[in-house]
Amino acid sequence: MSGGVTVRIVREDDVPALTALLTADREHLAPWDPQRPDDYWTEAFQRQDTARTGRSPA
C-alpha cells in the first residue's frame, strides 16, 4: 500500500525528529499538556527518556 502509515516503537535515531515535533507543537498543545521540566524539550532529555522507558529496541 503506497502512502500508508506505519506504527512502530520509537528508536534512538528517531530522537531528533521527535524533539523537533514536540517543540513545534509545544505552544499549541500547552493548554492540554501537563507541566514539564524545561529540559523535556531537548534532544538530550528525549534520548535519555527513550532509553529509560525501554522504548528503544536492543
Image: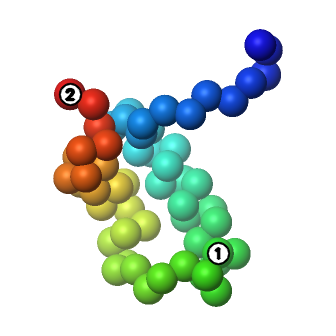
Asked if residue 56 can be seen in this view, the reply is yes
Residue at x-position 55% and y-position 64%: 23
Q: Mark 2, mark 1: which one is toward the viewer? A: 2
Residue 45 in the image: above or below residue 53:
below
Residue 18 in the image: above or below residue 38:
above
Q: Residues within 10 Å of mark 2 (few under 14, many from 20)?
A: few
Tell whether 13 sits left or right of 48. right
> Of the numbered discs in the image, which one, if any, rests on residue 29?
1
Residue extending furthest toward the top = 1
Tell whether 51 sits left or right of 32. left
Tell whether 33 sits left or right of 37. right
Q: Residues within 10 Å of mark 1 (few under 14, many from 20)?
A: few
Asked if residue 44 can be seen in this view, the reply is no
Q: Gap in Å between the C-alphas at discs 2 and 1? A: 32 Å
Residue 56: x and y, percent?
Answer: 29, 37
The quarter of the picture where the C terminus appears is: top left
Decide which of 51, 15 is in the foreground and name it: 51
Residue 30: x and y, percent?
Answer: 60, 81
The quarter of the picture where the N terminus appears is: top right
SS for dot 2? loop
Query: Label 2 amino acid?
Result: Ala
Sequence-earlier tag: 2 or 1: 1
Residue at x-position 33% and y-position 72%: 39
Residue at x-position 59% and y-position 72%: 26
Q: Which residue is tagged 2?
A: 58
Residue 51: x and y, percent?
Answer: 23, 46
Tell whether 47 sits left or right of 33. left
SS for dot 1? helix
Residue 26 in the image: above or below residue 17:
below
